[in-house]
């Protein structure tokens, strides 16, 4: 019969339409909120989702996985008196590993002797140029540069897209919060190293 | 795991005495052919030895030795390793006979080599620039050509550290900073001569109707801003009524000289740039490049990594084919229903990429001799839920939704036919080649990675029309699911990286050609190393670019309305075509 294929296809689209509202009703009676709730979002982005699939951004937001990377930031340790101790030693490896070469580092030097210090005086990342590849974080030997999860970076002025040291520095606690598994792994490695050092010293 | 460029125990030097000599440079393979005898040599290769598929034509600028080299890679469509041959030319006035009479698939590739390297192919029917604009000065892939805002020959640039001073490139005076214009260039008076050449090439088509009256043709520019062209692609079409009389593609609107950037970069810097070629399939792009570099350096890949790579490749193929089907229906006028159904499955696959690689589309996941990070058991569980449960169901749903649809069938059947002979002739590769009845799939024909371990069939269809190009995508999705299911069952535990992944990779001098079966066709990377940390030559054999060579023969004689679906059925991405 001519038109059978079209009817068959329309059956598929009708099923989708039906599933959307049917699932809404099922959720209403059994499970609770399908929209604006973490369980609802998780269900809608799981393999079992049927019918409607979309997330209503910005009211709803998809949770990002731990490995999600956006722009780089610099990790600092919080000192006892609230001072920021950057992990960065200005070794320059990130700026060399950066494919589009968007990292500019000025190494600090001792004001008296003029010898280079192991800390950056200035640190710029041009976010317009950054290609979010994560190479800087991958090859940083001091766990000092890491990739952020914050993807809402709109600004009114392009000059604001050159992130300076102040804009880049974020505390370790923030890093531990967005990447708990990686943070745990790094801490375990560090503690093992320190333990090995201590046992050597003994 | 590596692809031998030329392992045949074939003594071409004895077969063609005085014409062919073996390439004996350290790290190189293949044969060097005398320029004058090239066409006869190639014809003999094709007809006597069966190397009927011209995979890649490119050039290399050996500035220190003051010569240019044209490199050809040919394969047999019956399978097996390929053959590489080269022609060496002087840097001043390099001329080589065109291979278009023997392999018509060389057409665009020779134009590209002329455009970017300034190698003149004598006898080429239409040797114009293809990626750059006609008024452009110089040939940008020559090693002595410097781009605007040129900093240094190779990265990393010394200005970044330890005294990094940031500046915007445009703050520097653009007109005194390496911007080269042709002599006496005046933007006020400049007429784009490229257009004249383009329309001139079309003007030779003329018809006379039965009454002896000259019929006027209409020239229609489809694109560069046209919703059906999937990006900025322009097709200059001459019409006789509604019938297409001739078609010339114009591309390069998205050209960024990926290859020059690649030659500035270190080997690893290039990895995220390959993501941006075919931005639907960054995993397979990564794979091809990693393969080429691994072949150059001889790094072995751990077992677990090979499985991870295969899983990622096949997921990429599935999502690419879903999107293609969805967008093809969009081109047909079904608007967004099938396209968005396809996007749903793609979203779920991209969720996996995001969790594994950190980014949905720009994965940057592969490293030389490994991958960036391991796949956790939770992610594997997600993959298997898709591979065993959801995706097979959804492939069937697409089948029900579309395959028998009378509108789709009547619009696609018999449209844009390409015979198998023509498909091979024009170097068509990938699903479009297989839809024309040539069962040529690199995963089977010349296996790389661990594809020889999996049990799957090469999908093939025989009519070579757009309907078959649609069907073959569904077939390939199903075959990919078979591979995925086997890979998930077999994946072993173990390390994921040979040695330590470093940001500086040194390679021994030499050349390598790594090619894979990307979702869009044969994706090849040709690398020449001079023993430093940056490639001397980096060439991408882009399937989208080369598959378009056959487009003219597919659309001529058809209707203008069908152009859109024929073009859509080939599956191109402009990021890869224009590079």
Image: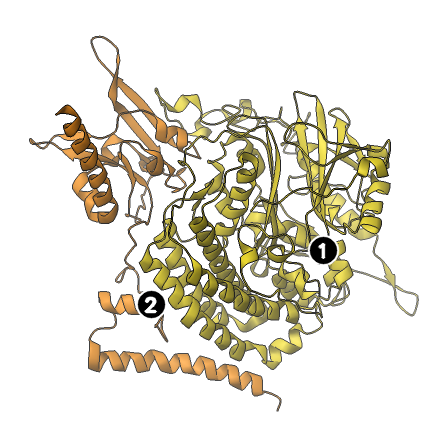
Chain colours: A orange, B yellow
What mark, if any, has residue B142 been given in the picture? none
| Closest to the observer, B179 or B551 | B551
Task: For mark 2, name the chain.
Answer: A
Task: State whether discs 1 and 2 lie on one chain.
Answer: no
- Of badges 1 and 2, nearer the viewer stands 1
Residue labelled with disc 1: B77
Residue A106 screen position, x and y as percent? 31, 22
Instruction: Judge whether residue A6 can be spotted in this image.
Output: yes
Task: Tell which residue pokes out farthest to the top in this image.
Answer: A113
Q: Quadrant of residue B135?
A: top right
Q: Residue furthest left?
A: A81
Q: Which residue is mark 2?
A: A46
Residue nearer the viewer, B380 or B495? B495
* Left or right of residue B475: residue B363: left
- A113 is higher (above) or lower (below) than B348: above
**Residue B218 visible to an observer of this rendering:** no
Quadrant in the rendering for residue B243: bottom right
**Displayed quadrant of residue B489:** bottom left
Q: Position of residue B521 (x, y in %)?
A: 61, 55
Residue drawn at x 76%, y 54% as measured from the top left = B425
User: Where in the figure is residue B443, as x and y percent of width and height?
Assistant: 59, 56
- Lateral position of residue B511 relative to residue B105, left or right: left
Give neighbour class at mark 1: few <14, some 14-19, many 20+ (Cα, 10 Å). Answer: some
The secondary structure type at the circle numbered 2 is loop
Name above or below for residue B114 compared with residue B234. above
Report how far apart the C-alphas of labels 1 and 2 lie in the structure: 41 Å
Give me the chain letter of mark 1. B
């Amino acid at each position: 019969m001519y038109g059978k294929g079209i009817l068959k296809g329309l059956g598929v689209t009708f099923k989708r339409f039906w599933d959307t509202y049917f699932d809404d009703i099922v959720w209403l009676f059994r499970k609770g909120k399908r929209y604006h709730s973490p369980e609802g979002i998780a269900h809608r982005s799981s393999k079992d989702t049927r019918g409607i699939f979309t997330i209503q951004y910005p009211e709803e937001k998809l949770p990002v996985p731990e490995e999600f990377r956006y722009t780089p930031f610099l990790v600092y340790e919080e000192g006892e008196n609230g001072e920021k101790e950057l992990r960065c030693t200005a070794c320059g490896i990130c700026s060399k590993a950066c494919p589009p070469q968007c990292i500019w580092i000025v190494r600090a030097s001792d004001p008296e002797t003029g010898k280079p210090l192991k800390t950056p005086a200035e640190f710029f990342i041009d976010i317009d140029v950054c290609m979010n590849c994560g190479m800087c974080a991958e090859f940083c030997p001091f766990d000092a540069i890491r990739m952020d999860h914050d993807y809402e970076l709109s600004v009114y002025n392009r000059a604001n897209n050159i992130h300076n040291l102040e804009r880049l520095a974020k505390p370790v606690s923030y890093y531990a919060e967005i990447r708990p598994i990686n943070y745990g792994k790094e801490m375990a490695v560090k503690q093992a190293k320190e333990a090995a050092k201590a046992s050597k010293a003994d | 795991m590596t692809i031998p460029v030329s392992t045949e125990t074939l003594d071409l030097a004895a077969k063609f005495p005085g014409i062919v000599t073996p390439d004996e440079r350290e790290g190189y393979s293949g044969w060097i052919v005398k320029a004058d005898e090239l066409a006869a040599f190639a014809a003999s290769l094709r007809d006597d030895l069966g190397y009927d598929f011209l995979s890649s034509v490119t050039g290399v600028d050996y500035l220190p030795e003051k010569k240019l080299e044209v490199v050809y890679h040919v394969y047999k469509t019956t399978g097996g390793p390929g053959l590489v041959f080269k022609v060496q030319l002087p840097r001043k006035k390099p001329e080589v006979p065109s291979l278009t009479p023997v392999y018509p698939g060389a057409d665009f590739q020779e134009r590209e080599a002329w455009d970017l390297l300034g190698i003149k192919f004598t006898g080429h029917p239409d040797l114009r620039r293809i990626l750059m604009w006609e008024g452009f000065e110089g040939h940008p892939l020559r090693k002595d050509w410097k781009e605007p805002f040129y900093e240094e020959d190779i990265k990393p640039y010394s200005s970044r550290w330890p005294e990094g001073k940031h500046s915007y490139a445009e703050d520097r005076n653009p007109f005194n900073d390496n911007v080269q214009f042709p002599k006496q260039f005046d933007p006020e008076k400049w007429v784009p001569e490229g257009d004249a050449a383009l329309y001139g090439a079309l003007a030779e088509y003329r018809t006379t109707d039965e009454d002896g009256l000259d019929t006027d043709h209409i020239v229609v520019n489809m694109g560069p801003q046209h919703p059906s062209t999937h990006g900025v692609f322009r097709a200059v079409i001459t019409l006789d009524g509604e019938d297409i009389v001739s078609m010339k593609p114009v591309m390069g609107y998205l050209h960024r000289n990926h290859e020059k950037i690649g030659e500035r970069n270190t080997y690893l810097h290039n990895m995220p740039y390959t993501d941006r070629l075919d931005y639907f399939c960054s995993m397979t792009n990564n794979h091809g490049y990693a393969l080429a570099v691994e072949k150059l350096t001889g790094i072995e890949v751990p077992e677990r990594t090979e499985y991870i790579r295969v899983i990622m490749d096949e997921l990429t193929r599935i999502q690419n084919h879903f999107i293609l089907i969805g967008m093809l229906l969009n081109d047909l006028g079904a608007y967004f229903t099938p396209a968005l159904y396809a996007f749903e499955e793609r979203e779920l696959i991209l969720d996996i990429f995001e969790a594994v690689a950190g980014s949905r589309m720009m994965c940057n996941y592969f490293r030389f001799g490994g991958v960036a990070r391991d796949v956790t058991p939770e992610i594997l569980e997600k993959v298997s839920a898709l591979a065993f449960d959801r995706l097979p169901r959804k492939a069937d749903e697409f089948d029900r939704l579309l395959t028998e649809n009378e509108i789709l069938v009547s619009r696609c059947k018999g449209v844009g036919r390409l015979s198998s002979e023509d498909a091979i002739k024009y170097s068509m590769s990938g699903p479009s080649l297989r839809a024309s009845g040539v069962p040529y799939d690199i995963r089977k024909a010349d296996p790389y990675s661990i594809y020889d371990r999996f049990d799957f069939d090469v999908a093939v269809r025989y009519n070579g029309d757009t309907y078959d190009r649609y069907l073959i995508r569904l077939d390939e999705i199903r075959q990919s699911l078979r591979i995925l299911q086997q890979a998930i069952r077999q994946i072993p535990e173990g390390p994921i990286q040979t040695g330590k992944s470093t940001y500086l990779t040194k390679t021994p001098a030499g050349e390598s050609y790594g090619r894979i079966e990307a979702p869009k066709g044969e994706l090849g990377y040709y690398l020449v190393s001079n023993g430093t940390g940056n490639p001397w030559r980096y060439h991408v054999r882009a399937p989208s670019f080369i598959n378009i060579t056959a487009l003219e023969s597919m659309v001529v004689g058809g209707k203008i309305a069908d152009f859109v679906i024929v073009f859509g059925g080939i599956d191109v991405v402009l990021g890869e075509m224009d590079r």
